[in-house]
Image (spheres, helix red, strand yellow):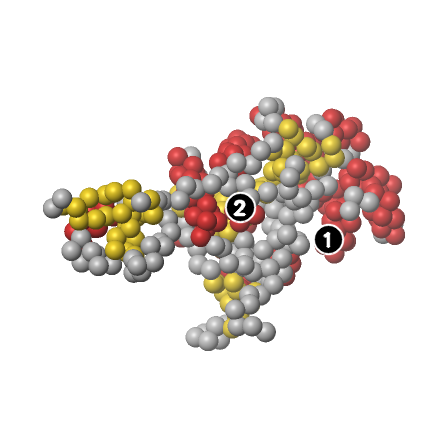
């Protein structure tokens, strides 16, 4: 293997794309700041148990582990920043018993890519709100997610809504064991109602729950799905509340294209309620995902209601607005010492000044002017 080769699904980011990413990141963090979200920067490496790999199988499979040569304990390279932010809210910011709004932007590492078009090193950016259980905070975060994608020029967004609390309510009422619930969650992803029915029949569930689980993967489409769910699913308080929350979200975003999918459960296991995602016609998977994950902080000593979203900024390189390249000022290496003061003044003013070490070739790129000694003073002249 050549020494310059990178691992599969790992790639360099070259200058033009790197500038686009950094510019977009700055704009997004500025957007979050004016909405009251404070920036945090968790470490890339933690003890693996702090990354919640022990409670979330999906997250555990994504996490790359190494042995700490100082302590001998197992370390994990973070695969998701959300659990780290939950730790910060629960532990380091525990003096604030009110609402904490936090945002972040940083690389995560995955043991395997999420898909054929995915990188194993996403640049995850997102926002989280802790300390408020009402639907109003979910609406705030969905609005911020949609604004974020508008900043990076994603057109014709579709807002997808689901609620994992509906499935949990059915599983609890039907007295499913944890492994049975996990098995059904996997079958739901294929939206194969017949396979779901066959499996719950094998478990000899009452007909009421067989019909409910068989119906759930068929409940996707327009907002009419909510009415269908209300009339066909069992009359459980948790289901009624979940459907009311979804209707509230639909009303709040009436001007957006909305898709309902009550079997869309492809999230990390720590989510507990409302799920939301944003799609675009020219991308095969969700561009951003979020939802409610109440109680996640209990693993760090403080259980709090929480909701948030995140997305991989590297996924959106093709959408990012172009960044105009700064046109430079050429200075011959022979003039650099004499022009030192002028060079520093230009750089302090935001100009890009490039020392040309091969002036005889006259082949320096990125410059449209040059600094020359002319008429007893340093002057800028066009190239």
Residue at 78% from the left image edge and 40% from the top image edge: 217
User: Which mark's residue is nearer the viewer, 2 or 1?
Assistant: 2
Instruction: Point out the residue furthest to the left here.
Output: 376
Mark 1 Cα shell of 10 Å, populated few (<14), some (14-19), many (≥20): few
Pick the residue in front: 353 or 290: 353
Residue 180 visible in the current orientation: yes
What x and y, as percent, mark residue 315? 56, 47
Residue at 79% from the left image edge and 43% from the top image edge: 191
Q: Which residue is mark 2?
A: 317
Residue at 36% from the left image edge and 44% from the top image edge: 326
Mark 2 Cα shell of 10 Å, populated few (<14), some (14-19), many (≥20): some
Pick the residue in front: 258 or 72: 258
Pick the residue in front: 382 or 158: 382
Point out which mark residue 182 bears. Answer: 1
What x and y, as percent, mark residue 310? 54, 45
The secondary element bearing badge 2 is classed as loop
Residue 60 visible in the current orientation: no
Residue at 55% from the left image edge and 44% from the top image edge: 318
């Amino acid at each position: 293997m050549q020494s310059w080769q990178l691992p599969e699904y790992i790639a360099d980011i070259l200058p033009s794309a790197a500038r686009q990413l950094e510019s977009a990141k700055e704009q997004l963090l500025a957007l979050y700041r004016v909405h009251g979200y404070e920036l945090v920067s968790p470490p890339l490496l933690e003890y693996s148990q702090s990354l919640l790999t022990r409670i979330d199988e999906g997250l555990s499979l994504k996490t790359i582990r190494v042995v700490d040569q100082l302590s001998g304990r197992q370390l994990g390279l973070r695969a998701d920043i959300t659990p780290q932010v939950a730790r910060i809210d629960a532990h380091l910011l525990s003096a604030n018993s009110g609402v904490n709004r936090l945002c972040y932007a940083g690389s995560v590492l995955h043991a395997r890519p999420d898909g054929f078009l995915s990188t194993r090193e996403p640049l995850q950016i997102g926002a989280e709100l802790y300390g408020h259980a009402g639907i109003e905070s979910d609406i705030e975060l969905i609005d911020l997610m949609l604004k974020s994608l508008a900043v990076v020029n994603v057109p014709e967004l579709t807002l997808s809504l689901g609620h994992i609390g509906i499935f949990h309510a059915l599983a609890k009422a039907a007295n499913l064991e944890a492994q049975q619930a996990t098995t059904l969650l996997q079958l739901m992803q294929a939206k194969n109602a017949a396979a779901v029915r066959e499996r719950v029949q094998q478990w000899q569930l009452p007909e009421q729950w067989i019909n409910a689980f068989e119906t759930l993967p068929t409940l996707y489409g327009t907002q009419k799905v909510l009415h269908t769910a209300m009339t066909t699913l069992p009359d459980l308080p948790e289901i009624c509340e979940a459907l009311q929350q979804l209707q509230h979200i639909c009303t709040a975003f009436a001007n957006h294209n909305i898709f309902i999918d009550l079997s869309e459960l492809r999230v990390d296991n720590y989510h507990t309620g409302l799920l939301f995602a944003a799609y675009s016609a020219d991308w095969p998977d969700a561009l951003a995902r979020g939802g409610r994950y109440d109680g996640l902080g209990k693993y760090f000593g403080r259980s709090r209601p929480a909701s948030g979203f995140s997305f991989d900024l590297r996924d959106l390189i093709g959408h990012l607005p172009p960044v105009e390249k700064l046109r430079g000022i050429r200075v011959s290496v022979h003039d650099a010492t004499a022009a030192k003061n002028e060079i520093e003044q230009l750089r302090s003013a935001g100009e890009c000044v490039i020392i040309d070490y091969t002036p005889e070739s006259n082949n320096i790129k990125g410059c449209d002017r040059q600094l020359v000694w002319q008429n007893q003073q340093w002057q800028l002249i066009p190239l």
